[in-house]
Image (cartoon, rainbow, N blue to C red):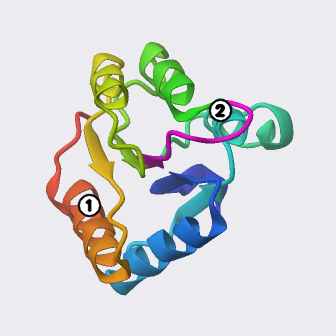
C-alpha cells in the first residue's frame, strides 16, 4: 500500500478493538487504504511525516481519522488538538471512537474541533454495526471541502 494515498488512519492502542474495527470496515470494502497506528505519538509521526514516517509524502493526508482517546505516549485529545491546529490537517474529518462516555471528554473533543464522537458499544455486533455505519458515512456520503 502506498502510504501517501491512505483513506483511513486508525489510531488505536488496543489490538482487539483495532482488529474489530478493521474487520467491520472490511465487510463494507472500506479497508483498501487503511493504516493502523498504535498510539498518539505514532499518529503524529505519520500525519506530519516525521520519525519513522519521515520518508512519507506529507501531502498524502487521510480522508478520515478514527481516533481513540486513552492511549500511551500521546493521548487522543492532544492528537486531535495538533491535527486541528495545523493548516495541512485541520480539514481532515476526525471521529473519536472510544470507550469513554465522560462528559468532559465529549465537551473537550468538540471544543477542539472533533467532527463526531462515538462511544464504542460493548457488544460485538453493535460495535461492528457502528463502525460500518461510520465508515460508510464518512467515506461515501460526507462531502469534504476540496
**Per the image, is 134 magenta?**
no
Residue at the image position 46 percent from the left and 14 percent from the top: 85
Quadrant of the image occupied by residue 18 = bottom right
**Per the image, is 67 magenta?**
yes
Residue at the image position 23 percent from the left and 34 percent from the top: 145
Residue at the image position 65 percent from the left and 37 percent from the top: 40
How far across and down, in percent of the image, does residue 103 sit? 28, 29
Tell me how far mark 2 sits from mark 1, CA to CA. 22 Å
Camera-side residue: 109 or 137? 109
Q: Is residue 29 visible?
A: no
Quadrant of the image occupied by residue 28 = bottom left
The boundaries of the magenta stretch are 65-74
As drawn, the residue found furthest toward the right would be 52
Image quadrant holding the N terminus, namely bottom right
How would you rate the neighbour count of disc 1 (Cα within 10 Å): few for under 14, some for 14-19, many for 20 or more? some
Which mark, residue 44?
Answer: 2
In this rendering, would 135 be left or right of 34? left
How far across and down, in percent of the image, does residue 20 sit? 49, 75
How far across and down, in percent of the image, does residue 125 sit? 31, 82
Principal secondary structure, stretch drawn in magenta = loop
How would you rate the neighbour count of disc 2 (Cα within 10 Å): few for under 14, some for 14-19, many for 20 or more? many
In this view, 124 is above or below 140: below
Question: Mark 2 vs mark 1: which is more N-terminal?
Answer: 2
**Kind of element beneath mark 2:** helix
**Kind of element beneath mark 1:** helix
Which mark, residue 134?
Answer: 1
In this view, 26 is above or below 132: below
In this rendering, would 55 be left or right of 127? right
Residue at the image position 51 percent from the left and 41 percent from the top: 61
Q: How many numbered marks, from 0 up? A: 2
Amino acid at each position: 500500500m502506498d502510504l501517501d494515498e491512505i483513506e483511513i488512519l486508525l489510531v488505536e492502542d488496543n489490538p482487539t478493538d483495532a482488529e474489530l474495527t478493521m474487520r467491520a470496515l472490511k465487510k463494507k470494502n472500506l479497508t483498501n487504504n487503511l493504516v493502523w497506528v498504535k498510539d498518539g505519538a505514532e499518529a503524529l509521526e505519520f500525519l506530519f511525516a516525521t520519525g519513522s514516517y519521515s520518508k512519507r509524502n506529507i501531502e498524502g493526508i487521510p480522508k478520515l481519522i478514527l481516533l481513540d482517546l486513552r492511549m500511551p505516549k500521546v493521548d487522543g485529545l492532544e492528537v486531535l488538538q495538533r491535527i486541528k491546529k495545523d493548516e495541512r490537517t485541520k480539514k481532515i474529518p476526525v471521529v473519536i471512537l472510544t470507550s469513554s462516555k465522560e462528559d468532559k471528554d465529549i465537551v473537550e473533543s468538540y471544543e477542539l474541533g472533533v467532527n463526531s464522537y462515538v462511544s464504542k458499544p460493548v457488544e460485538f455486533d453493535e460495535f461492528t454495526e457502528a463502525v460500518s455505519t461510520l465508515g460508510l458515512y464518512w467515506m461515501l456520503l460526507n462531502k469534504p471541502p476540496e
